[in-house]
Image (cartoon, coloured by chain):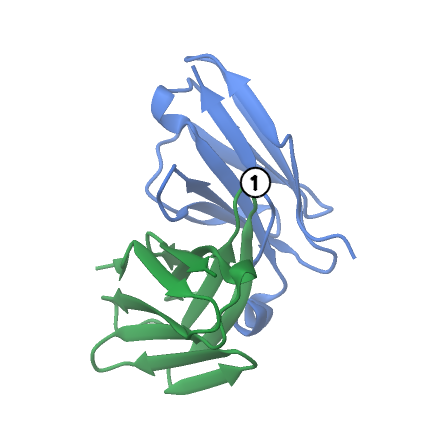
Amino acid sequence: DAGVTQSPTHLIKTRGQQVTLRCSPKSGHDTVSWYQQALGQGPQFIFQYYEEEERQRGNFPDRFSGHQFPNYSSELNVNALLLGDSALYLCASSPDLQGMFDYGYTFGSGTRLTVV
Amino acid sequence: GEDVEQSLFLSVREGDSSVINCTYTDSSSTYLYWYKQEPGAGLQLLTYIFSNMDMKQDQRLTVLLNKKDKHLSLRIADTQTGDSAIYFCAESIDTDKLIFGTGTRLQVFP
């Protein structure tokens, strides 16, 4: 059973560009969350998608946006990239709400974004 | 407020027990989690505890929760070199997000 799949694994972008990161949740999971993990830090919550809608958002600017598709996969878009956006971006999926409490999130291996 | 704190580094000898500590500030936390992150990898859920529990044991792992002091600990018995990684505690207050600590790097030496 494939877990959470993220693509690409690594990415280098230039300041001011736009980037799209992709996530396929674990089979049977319908909720997708995105986290940003800067070097040496714990992951920070960006937002969560459920039923194709953003359910909650962390303290991230509007440059960060997302989307969830009917097959539960998700994209994270970042516009006008800054050097400070360099980080590991983690996607996490979970089953229904009770399942999240029981099993926690399943995390992907992440996309390492470097902005130069 | 939301804040989770951990010590940055722990070094133990192979075969000894490791204890990783975490403090959190939000008393309305419902679940508390321990995740493991190996180099270049995502986060692996190790164990979790519901906020109305004091202790949970799962093979070599023991989680202790002191809700009064908002203190969570993870004990790893018989620590092995394969346990070397960064360990994150995380709290969930509602269904929507996890709040992570800064992580504790565990180094196991022979």
Nearer to me, B19 or A86: B19
Q: Answer left or right for A6 relative to A27.
A: left
Q: Quadrant of residue B58?
A: bottom right
What's the residue at 27%, 81% (across, down)? B67
Residue B63 seen: yes
In the displayed structure, A38 sits above or below B107; it is above
Q: Amino acid at mark 1?
A: Gly
Q: Which quadrant does the N terminus of chain B fall into?
A: bottom left
In the displayed structure, A83 sits above or below A68; it is above
Residue B97 seen: no
In the displayed structure, B28 sits above or below B98; it is below
Looking at the rendered structure, the secondary structure element under dot 1 is loop
Nearer to me, B7 or B97: B7
Q: Residue A110 at x, y = what percent?
A: 57, 40
Q: Residue B76 at x, y = what percent?
A: 46, 73
Q: Residue A61 at x, y = what percent?
A: 35, 32
What's the residue at 42%, 56% (across, down)? B107
Q: Answer left or right for A37 relative to A100.
A: left
Chain B on-screen colour: green
Which lettered chain is shown in blue? A
Q: Mark 1 falls within which chain? A: A
In the displayed structure, B97 sits above or below A112; it is below
Q: Answer left or right for A37 relative to A1.
A: left
What's the residue at 26%, 73% (across, down)? B27
| Residue farthest right in this picture | A1
Q: Answer left or right for A8 relative to A101.
A: right
Graded by Cα atoms within 10 Å as few (under 14), some (14 to 19) or many (20 or more), the crowding at tag 1 reads: many
Total count of labels: 1
Q: Residue B65 at x, y = what percent?
A: 34, 80
State the residue position of label 1: A110
Nearer to me, A70 or B42: B42
